[in-house]
């Protein structure tokens, strides 16, 4: 199995490393004042993903979030069926983060110093949310990273996109995460979830994050390929920390404070 080690000079590897280092010291992620890179507003970090708000070149004024894999995974074609729960986690995390950006700000007098997403928070299946990947050879020319896997999540309308960037977010290059999950499941299981159909979201298989993730022969021999996930999966689609760590997933509030997120283990 490939190790997907950090790549020197990769902007996303730099953001992941900075967020990890700052998280270990329980202080908000920052960049050096002398750095030429703008400060990344980290929204979430766990053992699998680092999510930040794209503030310099967003495609939507309502919110644009980038969810980067912590490992330097080159593309979606590296993923196997075993990584289906990981993709479900990306989708769940994207919807939660976009919902938090979409929510009206609370009264300052009632604003807590730490924001949390309790495990009982329902996911909002908002049809204005777009979550997916830009597939090579296409790329977002404003965020030109092509060899470190990351998902884009934004709230429509994409009023800041422009026509040229729109090619990368259009049907030629855009791979919606719902379609990717459905097509992997259809390839490795007997469940048909109608890739590309609007009514697919009601399919029972979509209610099970790990559905279709394992494969095997009729005599009980498992043939699943090794996955890249570093963690167990939670019932609500969010990943837990790896067993080698005692730290919890962290949501970083806009004020820079952090909070552990309780979840329900399957």
Image (cartoon, rainbow, N blue to C red):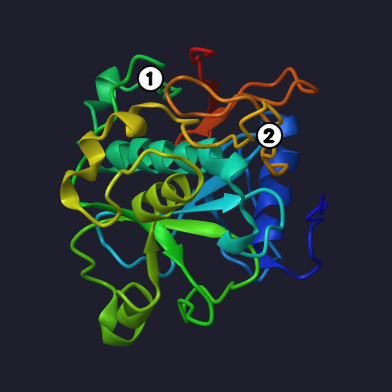
Q: Residue at x 45, y 76 (%)?
A: 140
Q: Position of residue 232 (x, y in %)?
A: 63, 24
Could one spot residue 159 in this view of the protein?
yes
On the image, the x and y values in percent for residue 100 come to 31, 36
Of residue 105 and residue 44, the one placed in the foreground of this image is 44
Q: Residues within 10 Å of mark 2 (few under 14, many from 20)?
A: some
Q: CA distance from mark 2 to mark 1?
A: 20 Å
Q: Is residue 32 visible?
A: no
Q: Is residue 195 above or below residue 115?
A: below
* Relative side of 120 to 81, left or right: left
Q: Which mark is residue 112?
A: 1
Residue beneath disc 2 = 23
Please state which of residues 256 and 193 is positioned toward the viewer in this rendering: 193
With respect to residue 112, does 99 lie above or below?
A: below
User: Residue 175 occupies which quadrant of the picture?
Assistant: bottom left
Residue at the front extreme?
219
Q: Horizontal placement of 45 versus 166: left or right?
A: right
- Counting from the top left corner in percent of width and height, residue 17 is at 73, 50
Q: Earlier in the sequence, mark 2 or mark 1?
A: 2
């Amino acid at each position: 199995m490939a190790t997907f080690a950090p790549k020197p000079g990769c902007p996303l590897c730099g953001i992941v490393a900075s967020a990890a280092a700052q998280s270990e010291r329980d202080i908000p992620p920052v960049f050096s004042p002398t750095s030429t890179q703008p400060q990344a507003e980290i929204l979430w970090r766990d053992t699998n993903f680092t999510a930040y708000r794209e503030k310099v070149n967003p495609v939507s004024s309502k919110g644009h979030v980038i969810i980067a894999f912590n490992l330097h995974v080159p593309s979606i074609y590296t993923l196997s069926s075993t990584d289906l729960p990981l993709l479900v986690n990306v989708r769940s995390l994207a919807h939660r983060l976009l919902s938090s950006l979409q929510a009206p700000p609370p009264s300052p007098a009632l604003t807590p110093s730490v924001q949390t997403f309790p495990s009982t928070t329902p996911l909002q299946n908002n049809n204005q949310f777009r979550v997916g990947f830009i597939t090579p050879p296409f790329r977002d020319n404003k965020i030109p990273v092509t060899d470190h896997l990351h998902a884009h999540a934004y709230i429509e309308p994409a009023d800041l996109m422009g026509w040229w960037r729109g090619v990368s977010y259009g049907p030629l290059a855009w791979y919606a995460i719902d379609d990717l999950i459905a097509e992997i499941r259809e390839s490795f299981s007997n469940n048909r979830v109608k890739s590309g159909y609007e009514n697919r979201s009601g399919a029972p298989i979509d209610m099970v994050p790990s559905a279709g993730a394992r494969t095997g022969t009729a005599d009980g021999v498992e043939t699943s390929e090794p996955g890249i996930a570093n963690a167990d999966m939670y019932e609500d689609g969010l990943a837990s920390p790896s067993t080698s760590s005692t730290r919890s997933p962290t949501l970083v509030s806009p004020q820079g404070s952090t909070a552990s997120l309780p979840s329900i283990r399957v």
